[in-house]
């Protein structure tokens, strides 16, 4: 998609982007992922794009329905809450966590554990927030950074709700590539393979990279997605040229 601020000409940066949701062995999208990329000029466009992943573990009998409900809560909060981008991103995860706590209060003998991770992209500003066993890998210059620095696993129990939520932030210059997903990905695919894929991710190869990682994971149902954004340069008269391609680091 082309992400631009609504309301006509702007000095803000313009980015072209693509997101690819991981698939199961039968080629169907894995549940637990929500990609929202509003059209320019809509009310939601002022918040930019939202990429959310929820992975539930536990004996709760309606996990699929609860997963979709959590994703919807996050989407409504992100686009409906007032405040800064960091505030609405935090509140979207906080709202999902409150819903999980409510379910666990009603069914204490069948507690649900959730890995939640959510990314927002607006005018070149990338923010990522998480709660529980979830992970993001993101390019910054010639490096790939991992968020959070201290990973939780599905064996760690239900995480606390922190007083101060850790948010990953990046002001994107020319381009960025991102993996977000459940931390169970790290049990199926090496961190080196994931990071190497992200380091060389482009708009052109994003879907192929998605398929490659799904195969690498043995077709396991692992919620997650890949995202790439590249800056485009306005041309006189309103047309656009594709921006400078991402410069991937050379393989050692």
Image (tube, rainbow, N blue to C red):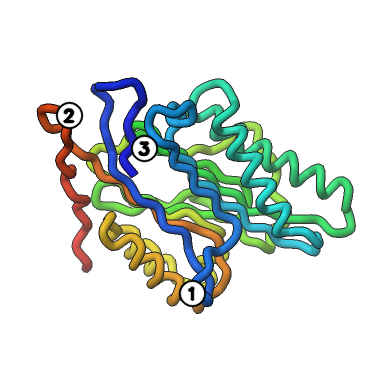
Residue depicted at 47% across the width and 59% down the height: 21
Q: Is residue 24 above or below residue 250?
A: below
* First in residue order: circle 1 vs circle 3: 3
Q: Residue 85 got which mark?
A: none
Mark 3 or 2: in front is 2
Q: Secondary structure at mark 2?
A: loop
Residue that label 2 marks: 238
Task: Please rate how many residues cluster around mark 3, counting C-alpha atoms within 10 Å: few if below 14, some from 14 to 19, many from 20.
Answer: some
Q: Quadrant of residue 184?
A: bottom right
* First in residue order: circle 2 vs circle 1: 1
**Residue 221 rendering spot, x and y as whole percentages:** 57, 69
Task: Please rate how many residues cluster around mark 2, counting C-alpha atoms within 10 Å: few if below 14, some from 14 to 19, many from 20.
Answer: few
Q: Nearer the viewer, residue 233 or 159?
A: 233
Q: Is residue 126 above or below residue 139?
A: above
Residue depicted at 26% across the width and 45% down the height: 230
Using the numbered discs, state the Cα–Cα distance from disc 2 to disc 1 in whole angstroms: 43 Å
Tell me: 232 left or right of 6.
left
Mark 1 or 3: in front is 1
**Residue 140 rendering spot, x and y as whole percentages:** 30, 46
Residue depicted at 74% across the width and 39% down the height: 98
Tell me: 193 left or right of 183.
left
Residue that label 1 marks: 217
């Amino acid at each position: 998609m082309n992400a631009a601020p609504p309301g006509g000409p702007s000095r803000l940066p313009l980015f072209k982007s693509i997101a690819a949701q991981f698939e199961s062995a039968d080629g169907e999208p894995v549940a637990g992922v929500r990609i929202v990329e509003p059209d320019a000029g809509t009310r939601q466009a002022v918040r930019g794009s939202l990429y959310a992943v929820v992975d539930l573990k536990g004996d709760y009998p309606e996990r699929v329905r609860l997963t979709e409900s959590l994703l919807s809560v996050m989407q409504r909060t992100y686009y409906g809450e007032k405040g800064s981008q960091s505030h609405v991103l935090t509140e979207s995860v906080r709202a999902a966590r409150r819903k999980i706590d409510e379910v666990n209060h009603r069914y204490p003998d069948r507690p649900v554990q959730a890995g939640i991770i959510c990314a927002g992209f607006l005018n070149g500003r990338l923010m990522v927030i998480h709660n529980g066993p979830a992970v993001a890998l993101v390019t910054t210059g010639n490096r790939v950074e991992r968020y959070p620095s201290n990973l939780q696993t599905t064996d760690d129990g239900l995480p606390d709700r922190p007083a101060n939520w850790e948010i990953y932030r990046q002001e994107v210059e020319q381009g960025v590539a991102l993996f977000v997903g459940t931390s169970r990905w790290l049990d199926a695919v090496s961190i080196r393979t994931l990071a190497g894929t992200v380091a060389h991710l482009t708009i052109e190869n994003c879907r192929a990279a998605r398929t490659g990682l799904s195969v690498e994971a043995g077709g396991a149902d692992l919620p997650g997605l890949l995202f790439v954004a590249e800056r485009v340069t306005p041309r006189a008269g309103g047309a656009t040229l594709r921006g400078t391609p991402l410069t991937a680091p050379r393989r050692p």
